[in-house]
Image (spheres, rainbow, N blue to C red):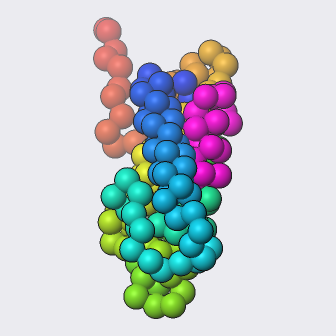
Amino acid sequence: MHIPVNHRLRPQWRFLAGLSGAYLLTFGIAGAIRTAGEPFFSREDTEALGLKTNPAFAWLSIIVGAIVLGGAIIGRNIDHFINIWGGAVFLLAGLIMLTVMQTPLNKLNYEISTCVVSFIIGTIMLIAGLYGKVGTPAESIAEEVLRHSTRPGDKFAVKPHANK
């Protein structure tokens, strides 16, 4: 598996992942305020930042948003692991919620727009995780050598000219 080390776009993707975490945290806080007093798994039409929510979804968003934002602030390889796994979880959650949206299993009060946001955040986090790996300069050089080397027998390998 190829995951770049010290990629030049790492800061931009880390920023976008942090922005996603900040959005989740803000959504969760706004949702917790708007749904105060409702049953934990309410299916009311309460909205925060344009998405339907309930107390369970609001508090889950606060926790996940704090983790994602904290990982982006701390950096190192912590954000790499948080973003890879978190991105996969967001994508999977979006798919699961699409399947249970019109059933009593929709405990987090999802709707289509919530699934779309979950897919967008999951994609941003997954890409940020893929480009977020940090290593030593030696590991970065070894990565570049491996990435640009050719294997014997490659039919597209560039062969050096023989000066005769």
Residue 147 or 98: which is nearer the viewer? 98
- Residue 67, percent from left and from top: 65, 44
- Residue 36, percent from left and from top: 57, 63
Quarter where residue 98 is shown: bottom left
Which span of residues is magenta-colored? Answer: 61-78
Magenta region includes residue 56: no
Left or right? Give the position of 95 relative to 75.
Answer: left
Q: Name which residue lies at 42% across and 28% down.
A: 12
- Residue 42, percent from left and from top: 53, 78
Seen in the picture, residue 113 relative to 3 is either above or below; the reply is: below
Left or right? Give the position of 6 relative to 139.
Answer: left
Give the tally of numbered discs: 0
Seen in the picture, residue 146 relative to 33 is either above or below; the reply is: above
Residue at the bottom extreme? 103
Residue 112 visible? The answer is: yes
Q: Name which residue lies at 46% across and 91% down.
A: 103
Residue 2 visible? The answer is: no
Magenta region includes residue 66: yes
Seen in the picture, residue 43 relative to 88 is either above or below; the reply is: below
Residue 28 or 133: which is nearer the viewer? 28
Per the picture, the main secondary structure of the magenta-coloured stretch is: helix
The C terminus, quarter of image: top left
Q: Name which residue lies at 54% across and 46% down.
A: 25
Residue at the top extreme? 164
Left or right? Give the position of 117 relative to 28.
Answer: left
- Residue 33, percent from left and from top: 53, 55
Q: Name which residue lies at 33% across and 72% down.
A: 112
